Amino acid sequence: MLFLWFHSLILTPESDLTKIENLHLAKIKKMKHLLFIISAFMITQTQAQDKTELPGNTDLPSTELELKTLAELEKGLFNYSVEDYFKKPEQSSFQFSPDGNYFSFRQRDENGKSHVYVKNTDTDKINLAVEEGEDLIRGYGWANNSRLIYLKDKGGDENYHIYAADIDGKNSMDLTPFDGVKANFSNSLKDQKDFVIVDLNKNNPEIFEPYKLNIVTGELTQLYKNEDASNPISGYTFDKDGNLKGYTQQEGATNYSLYYRLGEKEPFKKMLTTTWQDNFYIAGFDYASGNPHQAYVISNLESNTDELILYDFETNKEIKKVFSNPTFDVGGMSRSKLRNYEIDYYYFNGEKSTTIPVSDAYKKMHEKFQNQFGDKEFNISSVTDKEDKYLIYVTSDKLYGKYFTYDVNEDAFKEIMDLMPQLEEDNMAEMRSLKFKTRDGLTIYAYLTLPNITLTGAKVPLIVNPHGGPYGPRDSWGFNPESQLFASRGYATLQINYRGSGGYGKEFYLAGNKQIGRKMLNDLEDGVAYVKTLGLIDDSKIAIYGASYGGLATLGSLVKTPDLYTCGVDYVGVSNLFTFFKSFPPYWKPYLGQVYEQWYDENSKEDQEIMKKVSPALNVDKMKKPLFVIQGANDPRVNIDESDQVVLNLRKRGFDVPYMVKYDEGHGFGKEHNRIELYKSMMGFFAKHLKGA
């Protein structure tokens, strides 16, 4: 499965090494996927450039005064400001050191920068470990008990470098100091404290190869060569000791073969071949079994949804099915290294995040957590090697997030941080889970966030907010600062997991093939029609707003159904599939065969005709309603030309199109002050067209 992930550009409180490693696991899961990933630690930003070097048409952006005037159209007394929702938390991203003697966290300064600090749990002494400069820290984590590693890029080019620093801030260094090279964190090596495994495209910009990296000296040792650029290896599987056990190789553009070897001196043998439409990837080896070739695999080869199975790679046979859900893809499992890798729980993302306790030890702990946190969602964000101290992140649709510690020996919980204490739960809006049928019979899941005023029977304007992607990502239940901001201003928000979204099985995912600008937009329209039947919204005031692919969906909807929506906001959105395809970076090119099967084939005359119809920049003559466009000038994923085209073409037709461009940003605004300005202007735009300001 290929997914082009243009996800909602919302900063979340969690951006740590665990998430980076989990993201790598997701990448292995999507071996056959081209990853356009936007997550909490990968929102790009760029350095200011000289006026003569500014990208795009510099005559098009609205002036600061024009945008300020737009923002001032939002009038009224509100309980919460835009800053209350989008200012970075004062402290966030807490993690224990492996031995539990320290915990780290990020702390915001007066300039909106979030530095990494380390606190001694015995003495309470705090040290600055990593200072965030002009380039944002995308993620960080503990490499061992004395050293942290973190990710940064240069000016938003998304060529991420891996850095390391001691916990007192000394011996900081760029471990992958290669210009134009992208470093992907691959595997931690718990029993080799000074080493990690990374993937680099330093030998060929189109393909990645694995290296063992010394986090103290920066010494790199290449572990395998990826030499066939026409059939590149798309991912590597290592065990906990850093032994390369297998890899997945692309064959013929759209097929993928899994190779495995029984020993370091044995040859790799082809185990099976699948297409990009299938999942079969190793989630982790079964170290408890004593069989080094027995592994937990997530697969959909014999099912619609991803299921967890136990597989023997020596015999190349499935041993048994371990866990599955008939509707939702399994997310994975968590194991206890202390208890010989016993499985503690399985998890999946259904209408809400769901955990299935397995081990007796975790069942007891899970019950304690449920008794402590009630109906809130809770996640273990960090645990010590001795498994005697846990950091737990607690959240809900109305709670941004709180951190708690749980001391196993003392059987005691302690709240250590409320990330957004200014946002009182009782004042936040409810997010409801919905389910409806499309015009062609598909079951679609969605979320509706409602202003509290609807409890009095009042009908409110609706903002339809399609997620990015489109293939693979999905919206989930939980706290969403955008939806909460909209609710505080009297707007409902509808988030629809249209066909092609991830998590709902292979059939639903593949139903999105070649449906960009077509049935994917029908799903949005059918969702709006369903919500109208609930009697909660003002049918005459419906806006649409989305980022990246969501921006394309916004533009496409204003073209396809110009009478349905009152206005739209396009944030770093694709507008022209022809120019978008031509802007792909080198390491996406091996996957064009899959793009042509899933999106559209630019070389097919039939698909070219469809691409013309679903590229909004080529159809602005069909647009009738007001549009606000937002773009990071140095966006490496969606070039500024995508937004320039729409703005220029609409203005030629006499449209007044406010256009916010930030020349120090990329694919999504990472700087706090830019993000706040964005939402103030957006609220002014919605006030003008949904409230008649």
Image: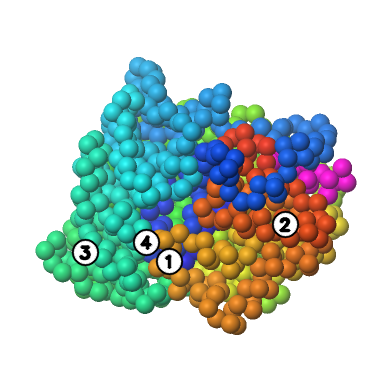
What separation in Å lies between label 4 and label 2 (alpha carbons)? 34 Å
Badge 3 is on which residue?
A: 293
Mark 1 belongs to which amino acid?
Lys
Q: Looking at the picture, how far across and down is residue 80, in whole percent?
A: 72, 32
Label 1 – label 2 distance at C-alpha: 30 Å
Query: Which contiguous range is marked in magenta?
Result: 679-693
Outermost residue to the front:
52
Image marks 3 and 1: residues in contact by CB distance under 8 Å: no
204 vs 38: above or below: below
Q: Earlier in the sequence, mark 1 or mark 4?
A: 4
Q: Nearer the viewer, mark 3 or mark 2?
A: 2
Q: Which residue is mark 2?
A: 648
- Image quadrant where one finds the N terminus: bottom left
Q: Residue 229 appears at what percent x and percent y?
A: 32, 68
- Give x and y (percent) for residue 568: 75, 55
Q: Earlier in the sequence, mark 3 or mark 1?
A: 3
* Residue that carries the numbered disc 1 in the rendered image: 589
What residue is drawn where x is 72% and y is 57%?
648
What residue is shown at x 62% (from left), y 58% (from top)? 642
Residue lying at 81% horizontally and 44% vertically, measured from the top left: 687
Residue placed under numbered mark 4 in the picture:
206
Q: Which of labels 3 and 1 is toward the front? A: 1
